[in-house]
Image: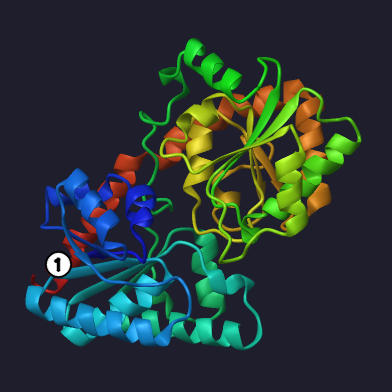
Amino acid sequence: MRITTVPISLEKLLEGQLSFMQSNFQVTAISAEPDRLADFGRQNDLKVFPVEMTRKITPWEDLKALIKLVRYLRKERPAIVHTHTPKAGIVGILAAKLAGVPIRLHTVAGLPLMEATGKKRWLLNTVEKLTYACATGVYPNSKGLYDFILKEKFTKPEKLNIIAGGSSNGINTKHFNPELFRETEKEKLRNSLSISANDFVFVFVGRLVGDKGINELVSAFKSLSAKNKTQGSKLLLVGPLETELDPLEQETLQEIERNPNIIAVGYQNDVRPYFAISNALVFPSYREGFPNVVMQAGAMGLPAIVSNINGCNEIIKDRENGVIIPVKNTAAIEETMSQFLEDKEFVSELKQKARSLIVERYEQSKVWNALLDEYNRLLKEVNC
């Protein structure tokens, strides 16, 4: 059983992995949003089971989800329950513990509690500790998260393991390959977005929310515009605008709407064409696990500007395939974007290593097979 809070995590963060595991196990995908989950099951020929979960703190709804899941697990009696995302972690792992599932695994791919304070931070810390206490194995998907978990004393080191070199799913470098896109296709997309062939395009891919650093990114680009340094450049924002959790500042929204050099295209099912017409990724997130976007951009041959947080600072080697900047630092974003615009030779040097470093370290098949080996090892230990 693989459990996530919402199906988009199955579709994007674990894309292809459940189908790969289906050749070795009977796999069931569990998540919220029944219709979307059913579509995912049909598209991937997988069994699914819907359980309504929310990304907010909703004790009553969580209790109902827990009871439903315990009943299902007791009936199905799986050998392995493997959860992802914080809410699915606490609900899924606790349910698996109560149902007597022998192997209970939780992957940590980013911790929202890193940005919380006060009573909320205490509550989130407590939930995280309970999740790990009920799990038989915990898998941070980066060395930075591994170190953070130990520092906060969420669990003991013997319960922790990093699969392969990090990442929850690796990267399919055959799929994310710039050679797949012809110049005519790229020119057509550029024209549709009013991007000229000579424009230098900075791209961000992800949710447009505060803790992805979008307020700072837009502010930095606005400042460059005021200094006439964005002539011949564009900021391309690819991802959904979220208005409920961690919404953007009003000033940021206004700048996105009125600045002709900022292009927001919303959620895109296939982000590769947007990488293909871009020159560099800017990813100033506050917190991550092991961000797929940074690997995807690198596989598409893009150098990256990333914040100095776990995951990002493992994928990017500073001044080899990108530049690492301080977190929540508008001035650093502006300065580095300005350097990229002015120093084409520097960008070219970064670009030369962008794809090769991803291929060498994070090819998807390595991650999948390493996880399969881990499953088989654990099954032998419990005689399943």
Q: Residues within 10 Å of mark 1 (few under 14, many from 20)?
A: some
Q: Position of residue 153 (x, y in %)?
A: 51, 82
Residue to which mark 1 is pinned: 379
Q: Position of residue 82 (x, y in %)?
A: 27, 66
The vertical placement of 199 against 310, above or below, is above
Viewer-proximal residue among 324 and 4: 4
Q: Is residue 381 left or right of residue 238?
A: left
Q: Position of residue 336 (x, y in %)?
A: 78, 39
The disc labelled 1 sits on which kind of residue? Leu
Residue visible at 56% across and 66% down in the picture: 244
Rendering quarter of residue 97: bottom left
The vertical placement of 59 against 160, above or below, is below
Q: Tell me if I can see residue 357 in this picture.
A: no
Viewer-proximal residue among 269 and 202: 269
Rendering quarter of residue 363: top left
Q: Is residue 19 left or right of residue 367?
A: left
Callout 1: SS: helix
Could you tell me which quadrant the N terminus lies in?
Answer: bottom left
Could you tell me which quadrant the C terminus lies in?
Answer: bottom left
Residue visible at 61% across and 88% down in the picture: 119
